[in-house]
Amino acid sequence: MELKVGCCGFPVSMKKYFETFNVVEVQKTFYKPPEVKTAEKWRKSAPEVFEFTIKAWQVITHPPNSPTYRKAGIKFENCGFFKPTEVVFMAWEKTREIAEALKAKIIVFQTPRSFRDTEENIENMRTFFGSIERKFTFCFEPRGWCGENIRKICGELDLIHVVDPFVSKQLYGEICYYRLHGFDYKHKYTDEELENLLRMIDRDGYVMFNNVHMFDDALRFKKLVEREAGLQQS
């Protein structure tokens, strides 16, 4: 079983991060994507084997009244919820450009709790994912959806279901993509919790920490994974 362990964003300098982990989920692409030349610079500064995954621009997934727009200092109308609008597809093109510049394989689409599993929203997803180039692995992190609809839409659109495994169970995907937010954002995982986490994993994939203590927790879990792999090989 191959697991990649890292953080959602850079909690330390890029240099130190590259020396410690082999994957990161870029968060700036969600709030306000960098210039392509900036992404290319990041790619060149990272080791060749280092992997970037990215979080899709919020203009695709989040409505104009989301507080995340204020945080980013940007404003758009007629966007979010995968609506088949010009601005949403513009946001996809920007997301795609950055993914290509970083040589990313995985793009994460995280939706707000207000994006419920209604017929309209599901149809918007069908239109969106049916219209874009499928050269990446797409991951979907919904909030508040029923399990049946998660299985159905992820199976139909070939999306990896993203979860925090301490909160819910992954319902679709050949690999796992776990985003650990902490029981609250300030939570620091105990050794026992990290050992339980390792026991939950039954397939190749990614374990990405997204809490205040993400760097330390991810490093401890990475060492646990490496130790377990060493014991299995001996």
Image (cartoon, rainbow, N blue to C red):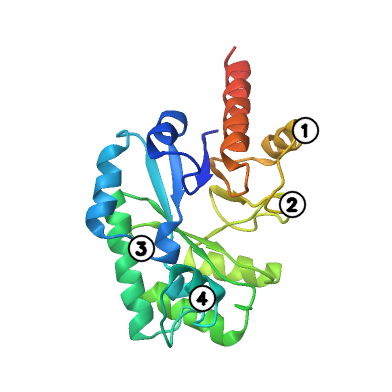
Quadrant location, the C terminus? top right
Mark with earlier residue (3, 1): 3
Q: Nearer the viewer, residue 104 or 175?
A: 104
The tag on residue 33 is: 3
Q: Nearer the viewer, residue 136 or 36?
A: 36
Residue placed furthest toward the left: 37
Residue placed furthest toward the top: 234
Label 2: element kind: loop
Label 4, label 2: how far apart the Cα atoms are: 23 Å
Few, some or many residues within 10 Å of mark 1 (<14, 14–19, 20+) = few
Amino acid at circle 2: Phe
Circle 2/circle 3 CB separation < 8 Å:
no
Residue 131 falls in image quadrant: bottom left
Residue position for label 1:
192
Residue position for label 2:
183
Q: Nearer the viewer, residue 233 or 55?
A: 55
Label 3: element kind: loop
Q: Residue at x 53, y 50 (%)?
A: 174
Mark with earlier residue (3, 4): 3
Circle 1/circle 2 CB separation < 8 Å:
no
The tag on residue 62 is: 4
Mark with earlier residue (1, 4): 4
Residue 195 falls in image quadrant: top right
Amino acid at circle 1: Glu
On screen, residue 203 above or below 26: above
Q: Is residue 22 left or right of residue 194?
A: left
Amino acid at circle 3: Pro
Few, some or many residues within 10 Å of mark 2 (<14, 14–19, 20+) = few
Circle 4/circle 2 CB separation < 8 Å:
no
